[in-house]
């Protein structure tokens, strides 16, 4: 069975990692293991934006990929961005082994609302499935309920399911991505 290695980034809450380790396999036919090492996000911090460049995190993750590794999913709690967008919830290498997601903007407290642990876990799962889908060559889906639908706000994430639509699952099966 394929293994997704969860890579802690900085001070991510271990409970969030353990939750992903248990929930990702219910949506994808994979096992999850939490790596015993953590990636320091500080080298990817850009003071002028007060954010962390997600592409730089992905690039640094490449040095951790071993030949036998299938997928490496970094899980952070820092504010991510790419230069052409104000922020991102995650980023992945299309067809590559690495992806990163962040809980930072998935938390209700970020928007001045009351803390909701269940909601942040659900949003993080949706983002993890989404970014892992990109590593499996999937593009954005037009079905707004599909985990592969594009999201530019948490409200759009909340509309999505934490699983892929039939068409996206068919693509995965037909390209042998999870075989």
Image (cartoon, grey):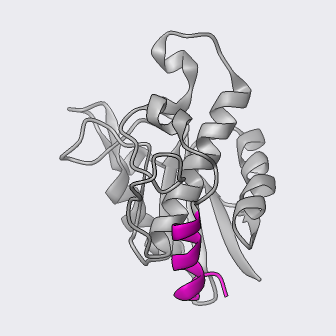
- Percent coordinates x, y for residue 171 in the rendering: 51, 78
Question: Which residue corresponds to the image point at 50% horizontal and 38% vertical from the top-left?
Answer: 157
- Which of the 4 image quadrants contains residue 94? bottom left
Is residue 175 magenta-colored?
yes
- Which of the 4 image quadrants contains residue 166? bottom right
Question: Which residue corresponds to the image point at 76% horizontal and 64% vertical from the top-left?
Answer: 25
- Percent coordinates x, y for residue 127 in the rendering: 54, 49
Q: Quadrant of the C terminus?
A: bottom right
Is residue 173 magenta-colored?
yes
Magenta segment, prevailing SS (helix, strand or loop): helix
- Percent coordinates x, y for residue 121 in the rendering: 68, 37
Q: Quadrant of the N terminus?
A: bottom right
- Which of the 4 image quadrants contains residue 118? top right
Q: Viewed as shown, does residue 166 lie left or right of 23?
A: left
Question: Which residue corresponds to the image point at 55% horizontal and 34% vertical from the top-left?
Answer: 158
Q: Viewed as shown, does residue 3 lie left or right of 166?
A: right
Judge by depth and name the residue closer to the eye, 26 or 170: 170
Residue 52 in sight: yes
Residue range (magenta): 166-179
């Amino acid at each position: 069975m394929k293994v997704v290695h969860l890579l802690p980034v900085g001070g991510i809450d271990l409970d969030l990692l353990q939750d992903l380790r248990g929930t990702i396999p219910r949506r994808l036919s994979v096992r999850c293991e939490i790596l015993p090492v953590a990636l320091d996000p500080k080298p990817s911090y850009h003071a002028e934006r007060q954010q962390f460049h997600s592409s730089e995190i992905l690039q640094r993750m490449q040095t951790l990929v071993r030949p036998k590794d299938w997928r490496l999913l970094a899980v952070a709690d820092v504010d991510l961005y790419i230069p052409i967008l104000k922020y991102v919830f995650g980023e992945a290498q299309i067809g590559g082994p690495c992806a990163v997601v962040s809980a930072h903007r998935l938390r209700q407290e970020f928007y001045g609302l009351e803390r909701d642990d269940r909601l942040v876990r659900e949003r993080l799962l949706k983002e993890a499935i989404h970014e892992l889908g990109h590593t499996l060559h999937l593009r954005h889906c037009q079905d707004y309920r599909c985990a592969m639908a594009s999201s530019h706000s948490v409200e759009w994430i909340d509309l999505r399911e934490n699983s892929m639509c039939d068409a996206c699952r068919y693509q995965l099966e037909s390209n042998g991505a999870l075989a």
